[in-house]
Image (spheres, rainbow, N blue to C red):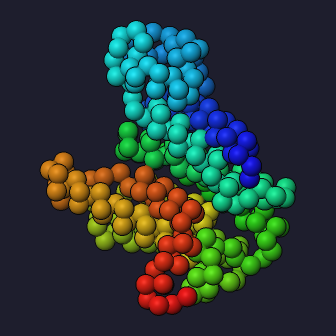
Amino acid sequence: MDPLTLVTLFIFGIAIGSFLNVVILRYDGEHFLLDAKMIGGRSHCMHCRQTLRWFELVPLFSFLLQGGRCRRCKARLNIQYPIVELLSGSVFAFVPLVLGTGAAPLIAIAALWVAVFEALLVMAAIDIRLGIIPDEINIFLGVIGVFLAIVSVGYFGPANQSFLGPYAAIFGAQGSAILARAVGAVGAGAFFALLIAATRGRGMGMGDLKLAIPLGLVFGWPDIVFVLVFAFVAGAAVGVLAIVRGKNSMKGTLPFGPFLALGAATLFFWGAPIFSWYFSLLGIR
């Protein structure tokens, strides 16, 4: 991908991220995620409620130029604004870079994966803010998983394509892409159902279960296994760090949706390199 295309995609991505911030911050958990009454209307400062001018709405740059403060009331702006915009821009730029955009079906596949990670970005931010995962996002991811299966089979053929690269063969993942996604969805759902039952709902919530199923459909077997592994490792690391710093306790809870999103990104971008590194430590190539 040439640098101009990469930069263009990034700029478009941060603009989309600006809209996602509106959706995230105005969602209240009771209305439809994209309810026009919730996300409509002029943008305003969350502190002084003053309507923002066009030059205060330039994604990423307005926040930086204003020093992270409202131009009028000088209140600190939510750090979420630049973070979501930056991550959204990165999704638009680097997802196609990983997949390539040579042929029309491959462009469609890249667009679907961009949609997956944009949805996960919204989900993670809402879960951090409200501790809930909107059902609309789970349904959206499930639909995207079906389309990914259809487009991928049409372009790559019936064999399963894995982000583990050649190491996917270790897990018997050379069969049908459709079957792999079905197994991924059922397996992820069953695992979380057992976890919820074993912990009587204290370890995980139903929102995590409802998210795991479409994630299994999106990634398929065996990829979903390592999405979960990376998510639990990251969650455990953050949990231990929070306890050490005195900001949490053994009975405290952390929203798990962001860790599932992080696990998905880790597998997508670095799955094969991580496995290559791991097996090289064992002297296996």
Percent position (x, y) of residue 152?
Answer: 76, 66
Task: Pick out the residue farthest to the front.
Answer: 3
Q: Quadrant of the C terminus?
A: bottom right
Task: Name the residue: 77% across, 56% down.
Answer: 101
Residue 87 can be seen in this image: yes
Percent position (x, y) of residue 64?
Answer: 46, 26
* Quarter assignment of residue 174: bottom right
Q: Is residue 76 left or right of residue 159?
A: left
Q: Is residue 251 left or right of residue 83?
A: left
Task: Name the residue: 57% across, 63% down.
Answer: 268
* Quarter assignment of residue 158: bottom right
Q: Is residue 264 placed above or below 10 in the rendered structure?
A: below
Q: Is residue 49 placed above or below 174 in the rendered structure?
A: above
Task: Name the residue: 54% across, 66% down.
Answer: 270
Q: Is residue 82 placed above or below 165 in the rendered structure?
A: above
**Observer-nearest residue: 274 or 46?**
274
Percent position (x, y) of residue 258?
Answer: 43, 52
Percent position (x, y) of residue 95?
Answer: 64, 54
Q: Is residue 73 left or right of residue 121?
A: left
**Observer-nearest residue: 88 or 46?**
88
Task: Name the residue: 31% across, 71% down.
Answer: 198
**Observer-nearest residue: 237 or 135?**
237
